[in-house]
Image: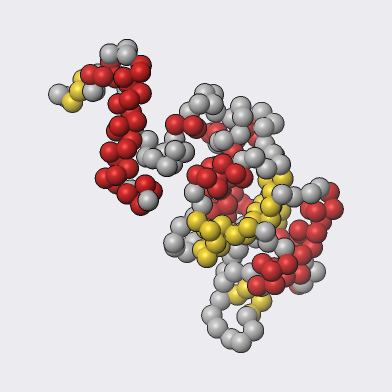
Amino acid sequence: MRIDIITVLPELLESPFGASILKRAIEKGLVEVHMHNLRDYTDKSYNQVDDYQFGGGAGMVLMIEPIDKCITALKTAREYDEVIYMTPDGLTLNQKMANGLSLLKNIIILCGHYKGVDHRVREAFITKEISVGDYVLSGGELGAAIVCDAVIRLLPGVLNDETSALTDSFQDNLLAPPVYTRPSEYKGMKVPEILLSGNFPKIEEWREDEAQKRTERLRPDILK
């Protein structure tokens, strides 16, 4: 898989891709992640990529020209399955969406900034708009990192135990059941006996029951 991220602040994305699972996935060649500084695609003085919005109002808007140049340059080298724009009014990211994106080969993620992008960008180039929640961030970079993390961990070979992702919360429209590790008793708090029994069919039944109970209690909206 290849992910191209277009941003005015590529330095914001250095840390998420420089450690842990994402770093290992890149080093193992399981995914390519490329950052593209939008300022490299403008002819304006001072590398300007934004301007005042027509009609007045607070906040600057990313101009269409540098975005067009960047996306066009990328598309001359390969075909893209999706061109994604990170925006608060997009479809809310969920596990089903992450699963679908993980099956794609090439995607572009455009990070909004300031007041957003010239709306013609969204009409002409964007194939999918994604939000990471009903709140506003300073830019789309952190949202893009969240999307990448959710997708990359699903790629074959990224996790040491590939079955781990299949038992995560939301994969089966349920929250994950409680998990425990050693010691089996700590300050009077004990691990449920069933988990120590070695009876794996019964353990799976317990986990499914606990997942159902936790979802009904904490996220009944998922069950609907």
Above or below — where is 125 with respect to 168?
below
For the point 72% across and 63% down, the residue is 125
| The residue positioned farthest toward the bottom in the image shown | 55
Near-viewer residue (153 or 140): 153
Give the left or right position of residue 115, taking residue 202 as reference: right
For the point 76% across and 58% down, the residue is 71
Near-viewer residue (18 or 192): 192
| The residue positioned farthest toward the right in the image shown | 76
| The residue positioned farthest toward the left in the image shown | 188
Above or below — where is 160 with respect to 19?
above
Residue 65 percent across, percent down from the top left: 76, 69
For the point 57% across and 72% down, the residue is 115
Please identify the quadrant where the N terminus is shown: top right
Residue 78 percent across, percent down from the top left: 81, 47
Near-viewer residue (197 or 149): 197
Give the left or right position of residue 106, taking residue 169 as reference: right
Q: How is the image coloured?
A: secondary structure
